[in-house]
Amino acid sequence: MPDLRDKTLFITGASRGIGREIALRCARDGARVVITGKTAQPHAKLPGTIHSVAEEVREVGGQALALQLDVRDERALAAAVEQAAAHFGGIDVLVNNASAISLTPTLQTPARRLDLMWQVNMRATFLAAQACIPHLQRAQNPHILTLSPPLNLDPKWLAPHAAYSISKYGMSLCMLGMAREFAAEGIACNCLWPRTTIATAAIEHNFPADILRASRHPAIVADAAYAILLRDSRTCSGNCFIDEEVLRAEGVTDMAPYAVTPGATLYEDLFLS
């Protein structure tokens, strides 16, 4: 069976949550993981740092490089990619996980929040791909995987929080466009989104506590991401995957272990009908 041993992954927003889980899942194969994020020192309200995750990666058998990075800074982003490629001898996988959220209606979304979501979500996805693609062009089975939703233009997903929805859809549009643009070079560009809400800091700080309890652990997204990254990049591109569907295709039928609260009725994530 294929695995990710000696593959180099560049992951944005990897100091906690889904990014951290993807790093650890791939590290168990012996992958080389570049952990990027803004949190280099312990945060008063948020768990984890890039350095604590790097240590966890090493503990489970992977290699790690922790790089402090604000993905809004295009020069720093490009420099981090080059440092990672020089350190590990290339890049095989880019995971665009970093994201900003503000579930606010139009009149309650100030310009600074609009700019933050656009810069961290769509813009950073585009620029990270732009920086990594020259290295991916030299890789075997190269993948770009972006944590963004399927395109659902039902107005119910735009009216309550248009700015956030547009920024997330922008991430998905990047992948669909790049999938076609780089198809001949065999670079897979895919999106991945959870069927249910995931117990991350974003859910904890933006939703009621009962939704957090009705969520799944980030491990389900990490397991789905891992399965996608093992697929042939030339035949698996241009998809908007849902985590549960990916795992069912891999033969996983019992999703119960992923639930935060055993037996709870789970809360479906945004953008899914």
Image (cartoon, grey):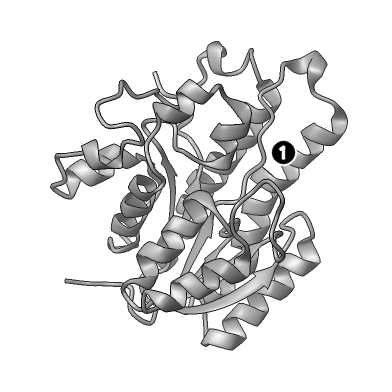
Q: Which residue is mark 1?
A: 117
Q: Residue at x 73, y 74 (%)?
A: 79
Classify residue 197 by image quadrant: top left
Q: Position of residue 183 (x, y in %)?
A: 42, 58
Left or right of 236? Residue 126 is right
Residue at the outermost right position: 111
* Residue 220 visible (yes or no): yes
Circle 1: residue type? Met
* Above or below for 107 versus 99: above
Residue 188 seen in the current view: no
Among the 4 quarters of the image, the one containing residue 245: top left
Residue 28 position in % (x across, y down): 33, 71
Q: Secondary structure at mark 1?
A: helix
Please determine whether, in this image, residue 150 is positioned above or below residue 98. above
* Quadrant showing the C terminus: top left
Which residue is drawn at the image coordinates 37% and 67% (left, top)? Answer: 26
Image point 33% across, 62% down: which residue? 234
